[in-house]
Image (spheres, rainbow, N blue to C red):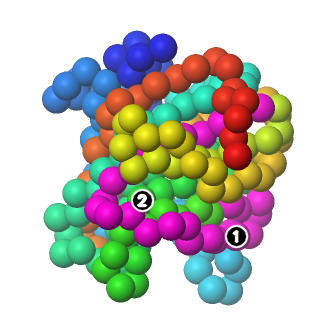
């Protein structure tokens, strides 16, 4: 299924319907100052993340190109990516600015406390992100370009059943941050070769 075919059924995290995008299959998400999703009691607890998402109940492979266009001054943790929500917790997978100013891949799995991991460095603020869901197993993969083969990054489990997939931007320490998503592709079959 192509990105344009996926436009139906997407809603903002506050329930609003999305406005028509500049191009078919293209989504733009802008985070206001302080937007983030993180949960370590006594350290950092915040649940204020704008996302454009839709619900899934079965297995799937979903990929999208994410690019961060942070007009907020280029602060640490400006990011854009994919967030997954279930009744048991959430996980996010994103292109994020590191403390040194470089770009990297970051994953956070919270069930309920946040387990964060930094992945490989990127040449710039963009990457193709892929999520594979098969029963309770979820896998994150990434690629530098549209034609490159996806490479394994992380696997974990979430409860089978209802799952909400969202495209998000965050700006924990910036005035704002915008993420642009395109080349959205959905396959109802889980990718078999994930390693």
Please name the predominant secondary structure of the magenta segment in the image: strand
Q: Specify whether 39 is left or right of 105.
A: right
Residue 40, above or below 134:
below
Residue 6 among magenta residues: no
Going 68% across and 69% down the picture, which residue do you hit? Answer: 114
Q: Quadrant of residue 191?
A: top right
Q: Give percent across and percent down for residue 21.
A: 22, 28
Q: Residue at label 1? A: 115
Going 39% across and 84% down the picture, which residue do you hit? Answer: 99
Q: Give percent across and percent down for residue 169.
A: 38, 55
> What whole-number distance in Å separates the C-alpha atoms at marks 1 and 2?
17 Å
Q: Which residues are magenta?
A: 109-134
CB atoms at circles 1 and 2 under 8 Å apart? no
Q: Specify whether 46 is left or right of 66.
A: right
Q: Quadrant of residue 116?
A: bottom right
Residue 2, above or below 88:
above
Circle 1: element type: strand
Residue 113, above or below 88:
below
């Amino acid at each position: 299924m192509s990105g344009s075919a996926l436009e139906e059924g997407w809603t903002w995290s506050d329930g609003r319907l999305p406005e028509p995008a500049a191009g078919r299959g293209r989504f733009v998400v802008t985070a206001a100052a302080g937007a983030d999703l993180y949960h370590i009691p006594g350290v950092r607890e915040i649940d204020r993340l704008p996302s454009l998402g839709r619900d899934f109940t079965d297995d799937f492979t979903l990929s999208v190109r994410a690019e961060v266009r942070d007009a907020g001054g280029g602060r640490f943790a400006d990011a854009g990516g994919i967030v997954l929500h279930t009744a048991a917790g959430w996980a996010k997978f994103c292109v994020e600015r590191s403390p040194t100013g470089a770009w990297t891949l970051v994953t956070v799995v919270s069930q309920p406390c946040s387990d964060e991991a930094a992945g490989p460095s990127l040449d710039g603020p963009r990457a193709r992100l892929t999520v594979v869901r098969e029963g309770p197993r979820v896998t994150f993969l990434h690629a530098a370009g549209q034609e490159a083969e996806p490479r394994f990054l992380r696997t974990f489990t979430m409860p089978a059943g209802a799952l909400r997939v969202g495209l998000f931007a965050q700006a924990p320490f910036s005035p704002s941050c915008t993420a642009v998503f395109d080349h959205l592709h959905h396959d109802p079959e889980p990718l078999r070769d994930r390693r």
